[in-house]
Amino acid sequence: MFRHKKRSTNGDDKSRPSRAGTSGDVDSRTGVLPDGSCLAGAKAAAFAGATVDCHWEASPPRFDGTLEAFAAAHATEAALVAQLRNIVKKCSCGKVCGFSLTECNACGKPLPAETSHSPNVFSGFIYGIASAPFPLHISIRRQSAQLLVFDDLLALTPCHLNAVPTSAYIPDWRFLLRRPREGLLLVRTLEEAAWACACEEFLASPSFRHKFLRGAARTEWTSAHSEALRPHMVVGANFPPSQFQLHLQCFLMPWLPFQYRMYLDGQHMTKGRFFPLSYIKARRRRLPASTPRAPPALVRSGGLAKHERTPSNFLTYAQTLSRHKKSRN
Ligand SMILES: [Zn+2]
């Protein structure tokens, strides 16, 4: 179903149904619904392989309650309770923003200086909590005592995975710098797990390959194809993160069409916020192998030092954007 958005100048979405059930009153001749949506008669066969079901059996939550109730049950364990919340700045418009921002990235108003909290749903996934208070259902692709790989709830590409460590609490990727060698090992393990999922769960599926790949890889899958495709999985982490537990975002290209548009408009892999894994790994290499802890300047809270944000990390992004702008002029 394709939805034609009709937006007024004040940003209100005029295409939203005014009451529940209107979307059912379809004009059988035109396929147009009262809210402006069109039933385009998409052919199901053309979308075979667009999704790949996960094979893990559904299991009940280990804690059948809310994050709040879980925190109350562990009230004496301050370190654990701290893992259950994100540190954010809340705008008067209602948007929850990164704590390092000074202006709301939705309405542009100045943000309050003081920070507040929001539920850390990734901690909820790790501890097996039922809700936050909305249900914490996830589509698991791989799990062990050390890590969890699952489909992103708001997938931007047909195969969009999050790889999360479960044996350590790491609020954001900067904390990896405190123990650089272990940090590097950890991100490598997460990256390998995500790539293994992409291969075994998605690329092993003939219908997925037929939908998204070209050439011989559509009909047969070899180690050479795997090697050739691997650079097309973009991996990185945001800072500030949306959820305060390290999660490598792993996007196997291509983008979904709408999300590609968003990317061109600078809404995804945002410059200054999305840090490619190659950049994160390079931060480890600069430290001597014998360094037990990173220099304090590298782990100072409140953001990275300016000299760490090198424009070359975002060269491809900037080039894409510049090409896109030129083509529009
Ligand atoms: Zn706002």
Image: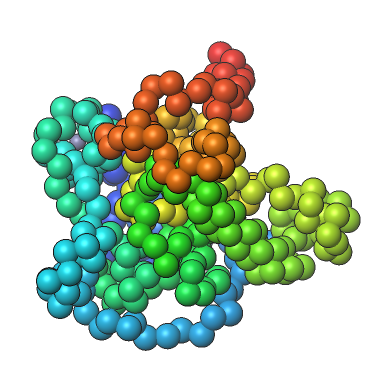
Nearest to the observer: residue 190 or residue 208: 190
Q: Which image quarter has ligand 1?
A: top left
Residue 229, given in percent of the width and then of the height, sits at: 75, 50
On screen, residue 17 versus residue 77, left or right, reads right
| Residue 196, picture quadrant | bottom right
Q: Classify the position of the C terminus by image quarter.
A: top right
Nearest to the observer: residue 92 or residue 237: 237
Residue 312, given in percent of the width and then of the height, sits at: 57, 23
Counting every numbered tag in the picture gives: 0
On screen, residue 41 versus residue 209, left or right, reads left
Nearest to the observer: residue 110 or residue 302: 302
Nearest to the observer: residue 313 or residue 158: 313
Give me the residue at 48% from left, 38% from top. Answer: 275
Q: Would residue 12 be seen by someone viewing this image from the given angle?
A: no
In the rendered image of this protein, does residue 168 appear above or below residue 145?
A: above
Residue 323, given in percent of the width and then of the height, sits at: 61, 20
Q: Would residue 307 be seen by someone viewing this image from the given angle?
A: yes
Give me the residue at 55% from left, 28% from top. Answer: 313
Give me the residue at 56% from left, 54% from top. Answer: 185
